[in-house]
Amino acid sequence: MKKEILYLTEYLAKSQGEQERAFYELLVQNLTSLELYTPTKFTQVQISALMSRQGFCAPSGFIEGTKALDAAFESALPKPLQEAKKSLFMTLLSVNFPKKKGFLNVSLDLFLSQLEPVEKSIYENLLAYVSGLNRALALFFVLGKEDVQNFTPERLVVFGESLHVKLLEFLFNEEENALLSQGLKELLGVYLSLYGKYLYM
């Protein structure tokens, strides 16, 4: 599982589209800067070939690769952690969109259909941040499960905080960054506690 996840992460980090690969490059750089991972020199084509040779299903493009990575994370993370993540995200939505909370209680699809354009933009930005953060922390979790000596709680915090800063720069303009950074930093703390609880328990 770990090997497949690393292959997929590097595969995505070496995507041809700059926008597509940006987040995954960021993720790999973040791990590398903490000396937790050394990326391979393989190209995306070589990674695909390696995956096929080793019995993994090689993705045919970015979207398929992202779905495969998310599926691999889902298999690797404990069920209680997955449930806690979902619950936290729903709480986040109900707090940030109190007037739409009733729709959220019915279904996420109904909630989304009721959002005004400005609210939809806020939701999409929030989703992008949370998705990025979850993928990054899931990767740390998977690697940390096999190497607790190097993937310490302190490094989890440093990894999360470093990624938080880069995600803000990546996703938001200066004005949005100023408005959201404190709230998202608090949210980061909740996610770090959540992943840390299951990684180090």
Image (cartoon, grey):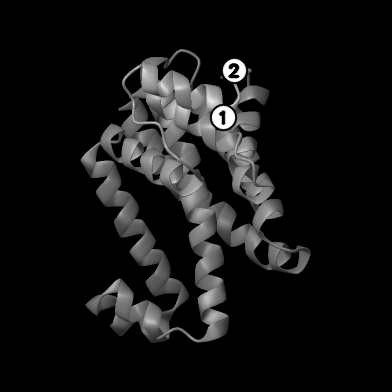
Q: Quadrant of residue 98?
A: bottom left
Q: Is residue 93 visible?
A: yes
The kind of residue tagged 1 is Gln
Residue 195 position within the rendered picture, expressed as x and y whole percent measured from the top left: 39, 38
Residue 60 position within the rendered picture, expressed as x and y whole percent measured from the top left: 45, 40
The kind of residue tagged 2 is Thr
Residue at (65% x, 57% y) in the render: 171
Q: Is residue 189 visible?
A: no
Tags 2 and 1 touching, CB below 8 Å: no
Give SS at disc 1: helix
Q: Is residue 186 left or right of residue 91?
A: right
Q: Which residue is mark 2?
A: 40
Q: Is residue 44 left or right of residue 108?
A: right
Number of disc labels: 2
Nearest the eye: 43 or 197: 43
Residue 132 position within the rendered picture, expressed as x and y whole percent measured from the top left: 52, 48
Rendered position, 151 above or below 30? above
Q: Report the mark closest to the observer, 2 or 1.
A: 1
Single out the residue that lies furthest toward the right: 174
Give SS at disc 2: loop
Quarter of the image for the N terminus: give it.
top left
Q: Which residue is mark 1?
A: 44
Rendered position, 104 above or below 201? below
Quarter of the image for the C terminus: give it.
top left
- How far apart marks 2 and 1 lie (CA) works out to 11 Å
Residue at (77% x, 63% y) in the render: 174
Q: Which mark is residue 160?
A: none
Rendered position, 17 above or below 54? below
Q: Answer few, some or many: residues within 10 Å of disc 1's Cα (few below 14, many 20 plus, some between 14 and 19).
A: some
